Structure formats: structure tokens, C-alpha cells
């Protein structure tokens, strides 16, 4: 069964994330309140944290940055991200491994 932060879509997946900006380094921390918590080194200024998040997710999941889109939570710590071209099983394996 997929974790609560992962939703399978016909063309990929949607991730429900909790973001902690200005961390010492960028990394996946684990599940927190049904969301996948990610620490970002980037500050939440002028969209830097959002850009860093999408870049990080693309690299982690092995998809081009253009296939990773912020769906909701532009100015919030709680975000939803759509990733095209990857399935839920692979996403869960990669993101749960930290």
C-alpha cells in the first residue's frame, strides 16, 4: 500500500510534501503527519526554495526538471508536486530510502 504522501496518477505521481527551508543540507527526512518531509538548504526567498525543491526532486527521481511541477503551496511549507514519467512504486522506493 502506498504511503499517504504519494498519489498515483495516469501520467506519473503527486507528492504531498512538508518543506523545511534553510536547513544545513538538502535531504529527505521521512514521513511527518502524512506528508513527506524534505529539508532544503535554500532560503524561502524569491522562489529559491521552490526552484531548489523541484531540482532536487528531479535529480532524486531521475527525471528531467521540466517533468516536475509545483501544483499547490507556492508560498506555503505544505506543497503538492506533480512528477511525470515515474510510477508510484519507484517513487516510494527512492524517496523512502532517504
Image (cartoon, helix red, strand yellow):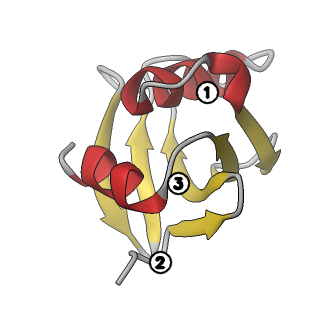
Q: Earlier in the sequence, mark 3 or mark 2?
A: 2
Task: Name the residue rendered at 41%, 43% in the picture.
Answer: 38
Which labelled disc corresponds to residue 4? 2
Q: Quadrant of the C terminus?
A: top left
Q: Earlier in the sequence, mark 3 or mark 1?
A: 3
22 vs 61: above or below: above
Q: Which residue is mark 3?
A: 18
The residue that mark 1 highlights is 54
SS type, badge 3 = strand
Residue 36 figure quarter:
bottom left
Q: Is 19 on the left-hand or right-hand side of 93?
A: right
Q: CA distance from mark 1 to mark 2?
A: 20 Å
Q: Where is 90 relative to 65, above or below?
A: below
* Picture coordinates of residue 57, whole percent (x, y): 49, 31
Question: From what the image shows, is residue 67 above or below residue 7?
Answer: above
Residue 34 vs residue 23, the one in the foreground: 34
Helix, strand or loop status at disc 2: loop
User: Is residue 4 shown left or right of residue 85?
Assistant: left
Res 68 label: none
The percent coordinates of residue 18 (x first, y second) are 52, 54
Q: CA distance from mark 3 to mark 1?
A: 13 Å
Q: CA distance from mark 3 to mark 2?
A: 13 Å
Amino acid at each position: 500500500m502506498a504511503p499517504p504522501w504519494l498519489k498515483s496518477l495516469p501520467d506519473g505521481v503527486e507528492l504531498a510534501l512538508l518543506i523545511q527551508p534553510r536547513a544545513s543540507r538538502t535531504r529527505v527526512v521521512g514521513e511527518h503527519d502524512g506528508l513527506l518531509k524534505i529539508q532544503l538548504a535554500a532560503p524561502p526567498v524569491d522562489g529559491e526554495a521552490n526552484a531548489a525543491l523541484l531540482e532536487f526532486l528531479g535529480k532524486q527521481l531521475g527525471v528531467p526538471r521540466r517533468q516536475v511541477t509545483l501544483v499547490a503551496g507556492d508560498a506555503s511549507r505544505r506543497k503538492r508536486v506533480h512528477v511525470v514519467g515515474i510510477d508510484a512504486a519507484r517513487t516510494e522506493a527512492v524517496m523512502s530510502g532517504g
